[in-house]
Image (cartoon, rainbow, N blue to C red):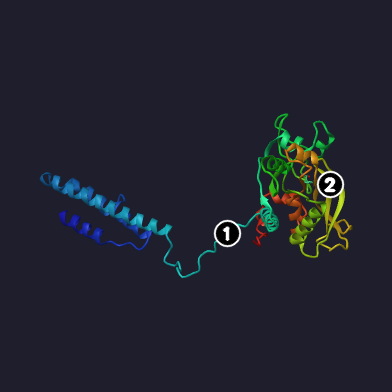
Amino acid sequence: MREKIESLLEEIKTFKAESKDQAEEFRLQLLSKKGKISVLFDEFRTVPNELKKEIGQRLNELRAHAQEKLDILKASFEDREDSPSDLTDLTLPAEPFIPGTHHPLSIIRDEIIDIFSRIGFTVADGPEIEDDWHNFSALNFPKDHPARDMQDTFFISDEIALRTHTSSVQVRLMETTTPPLRSIMPGTVYRNEAISARAHCFFHQVEGLYIDKDVSFADLKQTMLYFAQEMFGKQTQIRLRPSYFPFTEPSAEMDISCTICGGKGCNICKHTGWVEILGCGMVDPNVLENCKIDPLIYSGFAFGMGIERVAMLRYQVNDLRLFSENDVRFLAQFRSAI
Ligand code: PHE
């Protein structure tokens, strides 16, 4: 019996398995019901009493040893399954790391900021939840005036709403800065509109404001022409049509020559050769007064555009909803030039 135990112990010590299956086979040979160790336990009954203690101890040690060896073998094969197999070629090029892209609206916003910063405009920011004064009253929208209907508003209370334009930031700026001031205000705005290919309940704007002594409509026109040509190409022409905004007088809507057909007429410009791009005008003296700026000393112009609209024209996107659906097949097509 002793010899059998010793020789099995030796066998276990020297056993090497090449695979999980071999280790399992070894386990069956030793520890299954008819396995070598189990058979020894059966034979144990025949061991004379005076040897039972010593042999019993050796047998238990043998079984523990076998179990330990099998555990180690099993663990080593499991480790190997998680780690690269011997077939992994470590000289292969690594998996390419694909970085994300900028959102097209961010790309256009940054370009607009870049264009205006080259002629001295700084960037101003303000809250998206706005009070009546900054979004409407200071901008010459009297209470109950139908002009308020131009912008369907999400009200939070009588006095508080989601801003409908970033003109509210212009008011904040005028209230806290002594002219000259020259800033643009990029940001998200909200309007209670049904969602369609051409309208959304939130979108993004860049508005701009320039106030100094002797600022004229000619300055506005030249600034807008500069912007249009930087954004859409040197061949771009602009056209101003008289319009109405409560906070500017005179007011205009600006068109650019169609970026698709160059003015000849196509579907995008509805065969007119022109597409609307922004609203602008000379700041109404009432607005300056509301913001404690003397209209007899200072004058200024303001403008505002939708970033989505500019992006749609630049990239020929025909559905506004694509910008907020987060579809990577759409988003991955845009790469920033700056
Ligand atoms: N605030 C206007 C809008 O959201 C745009 C605008 C800004 C028009 C400044 C004129 C001057 O529609």
Mark 1 lies on residue = 99
Compare residues 217 and 297 and report the one nearer the observer.
297
- Judge from the rendering whether residue 64 lies leftward or rightward of residue 309; answer left or right: left
Compare residues 111 and 211 and report the one nearer the observer.
211
Indicate which disc, 2 or 1, sits on the residue closer to the N terminus.
Answer: 1
Q: Does the residue labelled 2 lie within 8 Å of ligand 1?
A: yes
Image spot of residue 66 (x, y percent): 27, 53
In this rendering, the label closer to the viewer, 2 or 1: 2
Q: Is residue 264 in sight in this rendering?
A: yes
Mark 2 lies on residue = 251
Q: Is 287 drawn above or below residue 219 in the view shown? A: above
Q: Is 187 drawn above or below residue 16 in the view shown? A: above
Q: Is 233 drawn above or below residue 60 in the view shown? A: below
Q: Residues within 10 Å of mark 1 (few under 14, many from 20)?
A: few
Q: Residues within 10 Å of mark 2 (few under 14, many from 20)?
A: many
Instruction: For ligand 1, give the image quadrant.
Output: top right
- Judge from the rendering whether residue 287 lies leftward or rightward of residue 128; answer left or right: right
Residue type pointed to by label 2 = Ser
- Judge from the rendering whether residue 103 lies leftward or rightward of residue 95; answer left or right: right
Q: Helix, strand, or loop for circle 1? A: loop
Q: Helix, strand, or loop for circle 2? A: strand
The image quarter containing residue 141 is top right
Q: Distance between the residues labelled 2 and 1?
A: 44 Å
Residue lying at the far bottom in this picture: please name it.
91
Image spot of residue 298 (x, y percent): 76, 45
